[in-house]
Structure formats: structure tokens, C-alpha cells
């Protein structure tokens, strides 16, 4: 079948001019584009649902693993030093996996343009200090020292405190992983001029 658009115009002599245009191809293209757009939207929805469901299904057992490994670590003399070390390794690995799941969820939100930021004034010095304190136990275990450097007037920035700390966590974790024993990791900030 064909799709035709027509227009009619009266002429001065009393006749009528009728013009026809075959728009079959254009209508088929519009229909195909609309179907493709609907399919992409459905695929995005399915992807978000999948990521959300998988994340939930993974988080639940991870919470249990982390909880029991912490309990084993604190079990005192009921568990050998080697057993406590293994429990600590399980806790660290499960915590890293939980953080990776959070990162996947964040990436899915960013990809879907649904990431909501909680923008506020963030004290840079406090942000750096918190990151250093959070990673102090891992640094100590790896025989790496962490220091924080910034000028007294480093001040404030506008941003999402939790997301900025998340970024610093990734950077410090990677730095600790790549730094040999007796090494040093410095978390530093300075004000940019202009």
C-alpha cells in the first residue's frame, strides 16, 4: 500500500488544483524510527531493572559475609591468629566487592542520566583528612604511611561530599595497592588561581 498526501487549491476560473505527494517511504521511516526508539527505551528500562535486581541479590549475601567475618575476627581465643587473618581477608574482599557493586549502580544511574547529586559546601581539608583516616588501617597493614598536605586557606568547594569521598577512596585504595612496604602516599590539595 502507498501513503499519499494531497492538497487542493481553488483556481480563479472556478476549477480546483489538486497536488499529490507520495510519502510512503517517509512514513515507513518515521514508523521504523519510532519503533526503534521504543525498543531502546525498553532496553534501557530492562538494563536498569537488571542492574538493580542483581545488585540487591548480591548485596544481601555480602552483608551476611561481612557480618560473620567481622564476628570471626572478634572471636578472640576461640579462633587461631591464622583463622582471624583469613576472616579479615574475607571481610576486606567482601567489602571491596560491595563497593564495586555500588560503583556499577552509580554507572548505571549516570548512563541513564538519573544520577542525583547532593551539592553543598565541602571543606577540602576535612575531606582529605577523612579519606586518610578511612584508609589508615590498610596503610598500616601494608606498612605504608599516609599524609595529608594542603595550605591553611585551601577552603571550600561546591560538590557532593559523599561522591567526592568516593573518588578519593578509589584513588587512595589504588595508591596503597601500588605502593610497596615502607612507601608513602600523600593526599594533597591546593587552590587553583583564577
Image (spheres, grey):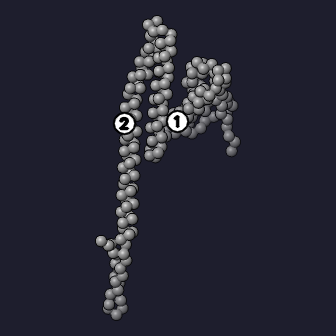
Q: Residue at x 36, y 63 (%)?
A: 31
Q: Residue furthest left?
A: 1
Query: Which residue bears the numbered disc 1?
Result: 163
Report, in whole angstroms, how far the alpha carbon at label 1 lies from the one at label 2: 23 Å
As drawn, the residue found furthest toward the bottom would be: 13
- Of residues 125 and 81, the one drawn nearer to the viewer in this rendering: 81
Residue 179 on image: x %, y %: 64, 26
Mark 1–mark 2 CB contact (< 8 Å): no
Q: What x and y, as percent, mark residue 18?
A: 34, 83
Q: Is residue 51 above or below residue 35?
A: above
Element at label 2: helix
Q: Identify whether 154 is placed above or below 17.
A: above
- The correct choice, above or below, for 44 with respect to 98 in the image is below
Quarter that holds the C terminus = top right
Mark nearer the N terminus (1 vs 2): 2
Q: Residues within 10 Å of mark 2 (few under 14, many from 20)?
A: few
Residue density around tag 1, few if under 14, some if 14–19, many if 20 or more, within 10 Å: some
Q: Which residue is mark 2?
A: 53
* Residue 50 visible somewhere in the drawing: yes
Q: Is residue 1 left or right of residue 143?
A: left
Question: Where's residue 29, x and y in %?
Answer: 39, 65
Q: Is residue 161 visible?
A: no
Q: Is residue 26 above or below residue 187?
A: below
Residue 152 appears in which quarter of the rendering? Answer: top right
Amino acid at each position: 500500500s502507498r501513503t499519499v498526501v494531497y492538497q487542493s487549491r481553488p483556481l480563479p476560473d472556478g476549477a480546483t488544483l489538486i497536488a499529490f505527494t507520495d510519502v510512503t517511504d517517509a512514513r515507513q521511516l518515521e514508523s521504523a524510527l519510532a519503533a526503534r526508539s521504543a525498543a531502546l527505551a525498553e532496553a534501557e528500562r530492562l538494563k536498569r531493572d537488571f542492574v538493580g535486581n542483581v545488585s540487591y541479590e548480591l548485596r544481601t549475601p555480602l552483608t551476611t559475609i561481612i557480618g560473620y567475618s567481622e564476628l570471626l575476627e572478634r572471636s578472640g581465643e576461640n579462633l587461631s591468629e591464622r583463622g582471624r587473618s583469613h576472616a579479615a581477608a574475607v571481610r576486606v574482599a567482601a567489602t571491596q566487592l560491595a563497593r564495586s557493586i555500588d560503583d556499577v549502580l552509580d554507572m548505571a544511574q549516570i548512563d541513564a542520566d538519573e544520577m542525583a547529586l547532593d551539592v553543598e559546601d565541602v571543606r577540602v581539608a576535612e575531606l582529605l583528612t577523612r579519606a586518610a583516616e578511612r584508609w589508615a588501617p590498610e596503610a598500616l597493614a601494608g606498612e605504608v604511611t599516609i599524609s595529608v598536605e594542603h595550605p591553611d586557606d585551601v577552603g571550600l568547594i561546591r560538590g557532593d561530599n559523599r561522591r567526592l569521598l568516593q573518588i578519593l577512596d578509589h584513588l587512595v585504595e589504588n595508591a596503597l595497592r601500588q605502593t610497596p612496604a615502607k612507601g608513602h602516599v600523600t593526599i594533597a590539595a591546593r587552590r587553583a588561581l583564577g
